[in-house]
Amino acid sequence: MQLTVFGASGKTGQQVVQQALSRGYQVVAYVRDPAKLSVTDANLKIIQGQLNDLDMIKGAVTGSQAVLSALGPTGKEASDQQISLGIGNILIALDELGIKRFIALSTTSAQDPYDIDSIKFRLRRTMIRKGSPSSYEAIVEYTELVRQSECDWTLLRIASLLTNASLTRNVQVGYLGRDKFKAKLSRANLAWFMLEQIDSTEFIRQAPAISN
Ligand SMILES: NC(=O)c1ccc[n+]([C@@H]2O[C@H](COP(=O)([O-])OP(=O)(O)OC[C@H]3O[C@@H](n4cnc5c(N)ncnc54)[C@H](OP(=O)(O)O)[C@@H]3O)[C@@H](O)[C@H]2O)c1
């Protein structure tokens, strides 16, 4: 089975690629800079392309049964502004090619109807919005695009500080104000849980928050 991974050169994206290859998937990695992707494998195909190139994106997802996005803002305004366009193009490609499963990263900057909001969460959002406005806007905007799409999407909203700690397969998944979350989330666990979603219907058209 073939997967396409966007944001494959990122710190989480590389975990997704490595773990997907370990699980025996054929992986197509779509990246803007192949030099940043250190993984090599006979079952890995790397495609260099930009997020505004719909034809390249269509080529990258052709033949894949599921598409994963580890794309996320890096705090650079011009780059962050491209993410929604890119996610929009991925969604167009999935729709046109009839690919249903889409699993993407988001963060708790994007609220969910199941969250129970509070002053604590509002303050946190305000701090992020003021500290990194382009990142905040990108996350809110592209999360909404995914929600409005017709595909079988799952958004995993990062609720904590990302770390490079080892894989434990131990994650808390739920909604702000209802469930408890830890202060940290390892990228290895995040990537593992993204891959677990491929064959799971539990969180289809849902956007739970996640931590270790
Ligand atoms: N660090 C934390 O504690 C924390 C906490 C909560 C949420 N987050 C968010 O979680 C996300 C994932 O974290 P991470 O550590 O894996 O981030 P990362 O290493 O910065 O990965 C982000 C990925 O998105 C890609 N990307 C961003 N803008 C792009 C653009 N305009 N065109 C093409 N590709 C683009 C990057 O490509 P390149 O490799 O080419 O740059 C990279 O592959 C990040 O967006 C971060 O903002 C982080």
Image (tube, grey):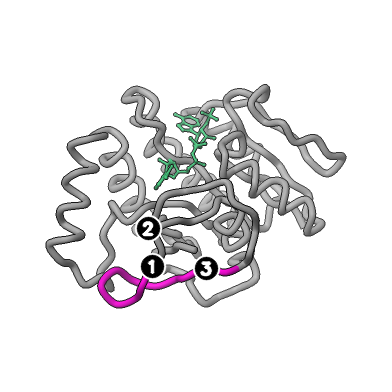
Q: Position of residue 183 (x, y in %)?
A: 39, 58
Judge whether residue 87 can be spotted in this image: yes
Q: Tell me the distance, in whole angstroms, between the alpha carbons under discs 1 and 3.
A: 9 Å
Disc 3 element: loop
Q: Position of residue 120 (x, y in %)?
A: 17, 60
Residue drawn at (29%, 68%) of the image? 176
Judge whether residue 207 can be spotted in this image: no
Residue under numbered circle 3 = 171
Residue under numbered circle 2 = 159
Asked if ligand 1 lies within 8 A of label 2, the reply is yes
- Quarter of the image holding residue 175? bottom left
Question: How many residues crowd around disc 3 within 10 Å: few (fewer than 14), some, or many (20 or more)?
Answer: some
Q: Considering only vertical position in the picture, is 76 above or below 179?
A: above
Q: Where is residue 149 in the image (x, y as percent from the top left)?
A: 40, 57
In this rendering, the label closer to the viewer, 1 or 2: 1
Q: Considering only vertical position in the picture, is 106 above or below 212?
A: above
**Nearer to the camera, 43 or 131:** 131
Q: Position of residue 139 (x, y in %)?
A: 33, 45
Q: Tell me which numbered mark, 2 or 3, is placed earlier along the sequence.
A: 2
Q: Considering only vertical position in the picture, is 74 above or below 175?
A: above
Disc 2 element: loop
Q: Tell me which numbered mark, 1 or 3, is placed earlier along the sequence.
A: 3
**Label 2 is placed on what type of residue?**
Ala
**Label 3 is placed on what type of residue?**
Val
